[in-house]
Image: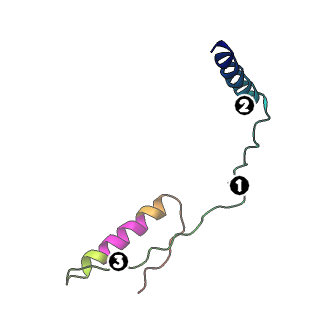
Amino acid sequence: MKINKFNILMMVTFSILYGCSGKSPQIVKDNHDKIQVKIIAVLPVESKNLNDQTSRLFRARLSEELYFKGYSKMPLEK
């Protein structure tokens, strides 16, 4: 019974040492310099109400918020 416990202890010790001694994986660099979003299109919103003005106001408000966040403004034509 002592031999089995010793073998298990050695396997656990080897597993820990092997797992900690290996090279760490390379970290992928962030490509923030290469890929930047400059324009976000705000598509029309479909409303279940008969009043179309609510969806137009929501779309206009969302477009303004994106503009103040630094994105380019696009015309809101249908």
Residue 40 spot, x, y in % from top left: 52, 69
Q: Quadrant of residue 12?
A: top right
Q: Residues within 10 Å of mark 1 (few under 14, many from 20)?
A: few
Could you tell me if the residues under marks 3 and 2 are in contact, i.e. CB atoms within 8 Å?
no
Q: Is residue 33 above or below residue 47?
A: above
Mark 1: amino acid: Asn
In the rendered view, tell whether residue 41 sits above or below residue 34.
Answer: below
Front position among marks 2 and 1? 2
Q: Is residue 57 left or right of residue 71?
A: left
- Would residue 3 appear left or right of 60 to someone viewing this image? right
First of labels 3, 2 by sequence position: 2
Task: State yes or no: discs 2 and 1 in contact (Cβ < 8 Å).
Answer: no
| Distance CA(mark 3)–CA(mark 2) | 52 Å
Amino acid type of the residue tagged 2 in the rendering: Gly
**Element under label 2?**
helix
Residue 15 vs 37, above or below: the answer is above
Q: Identify the residue under disc 1.
A: 31
- Disc number placed over residue 19 in the picture, else none: 2
- For this rendering, which residue is in front, 23 or 77? 23
Q: Are marks 3 and 1 in contact (CB under 8 Å)?
A: no
Can you tell which mark lies on residue 61? none
Quadrant containing the C terminus in the rendered view = bottom left
Question: Which residue lies under the disc numbered 3?
Answer: 45
The alpha-carbon separation of the residues under discs 2 and 1 comes to 30 Å
Whole-percent x, y for residue 75 in the image: 47, 79
Query: Which portion, as a residue range, is magenta?
Result: 56-64
> Which kind of residue does numbered mark 3 sit on?
Val
- At 41% across and 66% down in the image, what residue appears? 64
User: Can you give x and y, in whole percent of width and height, for residue 28 in the image?
Assistant: 72, 48
